[in-house]
Amino acid sequence: MAEKVLKSVIELVEENPSVNNRAVFERLWGITEKMIARIHARFDTQPDPCCKQFQDYRNLSEHAGEGSLQAYSGKEIDWLIHSYIGSPESSFTNMHITISLGPQYLVPNFGFALGTIPDLFLYMDYIPRTDLLLDIDYADKYYEAVNEEFLQLQADSRFRPFISRDLYTRIAMTPTAVGYCADPDPAVIDLVERIANQRLDRWLDWVDQAEQTPLEIRQQLMARDEQIRRNICERDPANNLAAKLFGEETAKQMVATLWGGNRTLPRPDGSG
């Protein structure tokens, strides 16, 4: 079993602040770009004007930080984020694809992140929209399918389990969540790309096959989704690195945009 990583992201970056990860970043960002193209091909969405100021983070600071934040919404998608932040020549990068579905489905939401801290970091999870302790049928339907993949990664010594020091971050991860550090070897990144696409394939199939949720629970589901999304974004330990790169106020607005607090597009009404 690989040694666990118990240090925070900030500690890991500060211990090795000058690693040039530009080539690794470009490869990882390319993975997300292929994934987001598939997502846009499946869902009809519009970019939200609230993210216009974050099209290019290099306009926000005199420091070496860079990044972009794209937010979308549509009839089936409540809130979709494709973003990155960091300083690729100075160890740290963080990339996200997160998808909150509209309330007409109970399919889990999609969480995905890659990065360099300065080693390769990866996170993948299906974010449940019911209580897994109570709803055993939901757990079996959506999480049994990924359990073997999780166990295989646990047994792969190339992947070092990343244990967040933040309590809420750990609470927000399901028992089949992927959270690891690894050396950024080409073979490892190839495997990460394959698993990422398997997770996306599985999720898209779930959406295509989903039954409509009862109308009477949809407003409650929307409120639950938004509150969980806000909690996860606001409690992200990497927010301190964003503040270091771009300043506290700019980082605060980035976080609000990530969870949808600054959105201008209406939320889907769940009628579809």
Image: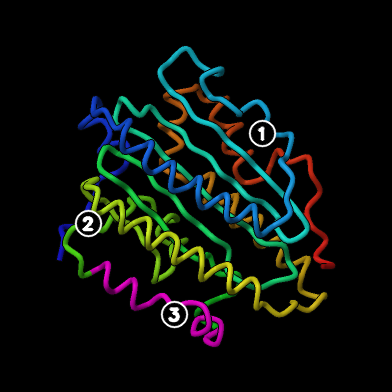
List the residue tagged with mark 3.
Answer: 145
Task: Check disc 1 and report its element: helix, strand or loop.
Answer: helix
Residue found at the far bottom of this picture: 137
Task: Check disc 3 and report its element: helix, strand or loop.
Answer: helix
Residue 135 shown left or right of residue 94 in the figure: right
Near mark 3 (Cα within 10 A), the count class, few <14, some 14-19 or many ≥20, is few
Residue 143 shown left or right of residue 212 in the figure: left
Q: Is residue 89 visible?
A: yes
List the residue tagged with mark 2.
Answer: 160
The x and y percentages for residue 237 are 41, 42
Residue 220 on the magenta segment: no
Residue found at the far top of this picture: 62
**Total marks drawn?**
3
* Kind of residue indicated by mark 3: Ala
Marks 3 and 2, the one that precedes in the sequence: 3
Residues drawn in magenta: 135-154
Q: Residue at x 50, y 63 (%)?
A: 200
| Dot label at residue 51 | 1
Quarter holding the N terminus?
bottom left
* Kind of residue indicated by mark 2: Arg
